[in-house]
Image: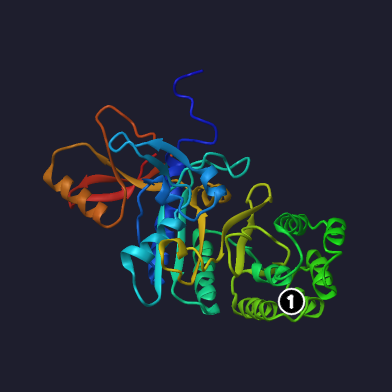
Amino acid sequence: MSAWVLPDHIADLLPAQAQQVEALRRQLLDRAMSHGYELVTPPLLEHLESLLTGTGEALNLMTFKLVDQTSGRTLGLRADTTPQVARVDAHLLNRAGVTRLCYCGPVAHTRAAHAHATREPLQFGAEIYGYAGREAEQDVLQLALDVLPQAGFSELVLDCADVRIVRALLQGQPLDAGQTQAVQQALARKDSEALHMLTAPLAQPVREGLRALPTLHGDRDVLARAQQLLPSLPLIVQALDDLRALAQGVQGARVSFDLSDMRGYAYYTGLRFAVITRLHDTGEPIELLRGGRYDEVGAVFGRSRPAVGFSLDIKELARALPESAPRLAIRAPWGTDPQLAQAIDRLRQGGETVICALPGHTLGQDALVCDRELVQTPQGWQVQPLSS
């Protein structure tokens, strides 16, 4: 094997790809900060026990471990930035009121999330701490549905669920941990036959509600059907009210619901959402971001604050977009003329890309196209269309 062959699901970003990823990173961060989200940058490495505190086995399996040669302690290479941001909110900022935070940086995964995924995502996220009302979800979703169209995405679908519905149905039922997990797995698979068997010993309203959940997916009519088919437990009523209010306020995306969606069930405490579109070339559905409410995320740090947010992989966003057009640039001659240097500096400060052609060499960058040139005229150095 060649020494320069990279590990599976690890890849270099060549100029055109790197340019597109960097442009997306800047757009997302600038937009988040324009919404009032403050930028934080947690470290890539932490002591393992700190990095994984309260995160569960799934994140542990995704985390690379190594030994710190300075202290001899085990370090972890972060696989998700959200727990770190919760620590920042709880311990370093320790604010009493609402805090909006955003972040962007690399994470590393021991395994790829899917066949086309990288094991080195560039994770962007935005989170609100300290507000328990549904307005926090609406604020976060407004940002999500603002940044994606700006990045070039259209025909977005906002897919929603709420873990409180299943938790309300299972609360107080005569099921042990194994049986409860089996019910959750049957719901995730929409396995009606298994649900009929597993829910047989449950009270009739709960039994019928759990059996109805796999059918409750689709457009906004789902919420009306859910109100008819599910028992009127307080948590269920609240969850449906919140989903209805959320759907009414969404602009820029088609809203769908899947009330038996169990992804993130152990992590989220209320609303769970994902934004989906289709790949520009194949039409294959692709999930651009996911998020929701996770009020317990700061509890392990001694400060259990309401929390809601979302995250995405900027490299995945770039994969879903058409390749960006080459950047247009100005070709300039190589020289030491002070007036030439001043002209180049003015152009660059004005946002132009100016490339000085080295003596005896032509310009051949794939990600840059020179459509103009800087030439000396009786009036001084001026930009003119590039001669063929």
Indicate the position of residue 152 as horizontal and vertical percent values.
Answer: 53, 59
In the picture of the structure, the residue carrying the numbered disc 1 is 223
Q: Quadrant of residue 213?
A: bottom right
Q: In the displayed structure, does residue 129 sit left or right of residue 372? A: right
Q: In the image, what residue occupies the spot 27% across and 57% down?
A: 350
Q: Quadrant of residue 93?
A: bottom left
Residue type at mark 1 is: Leu
Q: Which scheme is used to colour this image of the protein?
A: rainbow
Q: Quadrant of the C terminus?
A: top left
Q: Secondary structure at mark 1?
A: helix
The single residue placed furthest to the left in the displayed view is 338
Q: In the image, what residue occupies the spot 25% across and 53% down?
A: 347
Indicate the position of residue 20 as horizontal and vertical percent values.
Answer: 45, 48
Compared to residue 250, the image places residue 84 above or below, namely: above
Q: In the displayed structure, does residue 85 sit left or right of residue 345? A: right
Q: Quadrant of residue 183?
A: bottom right
